[in-house]
Amino acid sequence: MKLFIVAALFVAATVAAPVNPDTDAQILRYDNDNIGVGPYRVDVETSNGISQSAQGELKNAGTENEATEVRGQYSYVGPDNVVYTVTYIANENGYQADGAHIPRNQ
């Protein structure tokens, strides 16, 4: 019985906790086109300025070079209030990211 009371108090305290818009982001948009096979796409946007979009598909299906390829981008607001955006591709060659704030190898 004591365990139930402690658990109930914990749940009540969690539910009653104030929501801080600076740290507790809300999902504004979530689109998911994925039936578990074939190509997919997902788009997410949150109230704290984070957004993400990705699409993936199987390349060279049925061959020895078969690989999943994902292309996407994500953005976030940095501590300096600048929006940073990263575009990327992830495939058999690894994760390759690009953004104005990412140093490039010369």
Image (cartoon, rainbow, N blue to C red):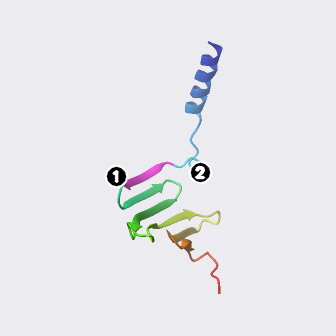
The residue under label 1 is: 35
Task: Identify which amino acid the numbered label 2 is placed on.
Answer: Asp
Give the left or right position of residue 39, taking residue 14 as reference: left
Q: Earlier in the sequence, mark 1 or mark 2?
A: 2
Give the left or right position of residue 83, taking residue 29 as reference: right
Residue 96 marker: none
Relative to 47, does residue 59 appear above or below in the rendering? below
Question: Residue at point 64% right, 78% down?
Answer: 103
Q: Position of residue 37 (x, y in %)?
A: 36, 55
Question: Residue at point 54% right, 70% down?
Answer: 86
Q: Position of residue 58 (x, y in %)?
A: 40, 65
Secondary element under disc 2, as helix, strand or loop, is loop
Task: Identify which amino acid the numbered label 1 is placed on.
Answer: Ile
Q: Position of residue 14 (x, y in %)?
A: 59, 32
Q: Which residues are magenta?
A: 26-36
Report, in whole angstroms, how far the alpha carbon at label 1 lies from the one at label 2.
Answer: 34 Å
Question: Residue at point 48% right, 54% down?
Answer: 46
Residue 105 placement: quadrant: bottom right
Residue 22 marker: 2
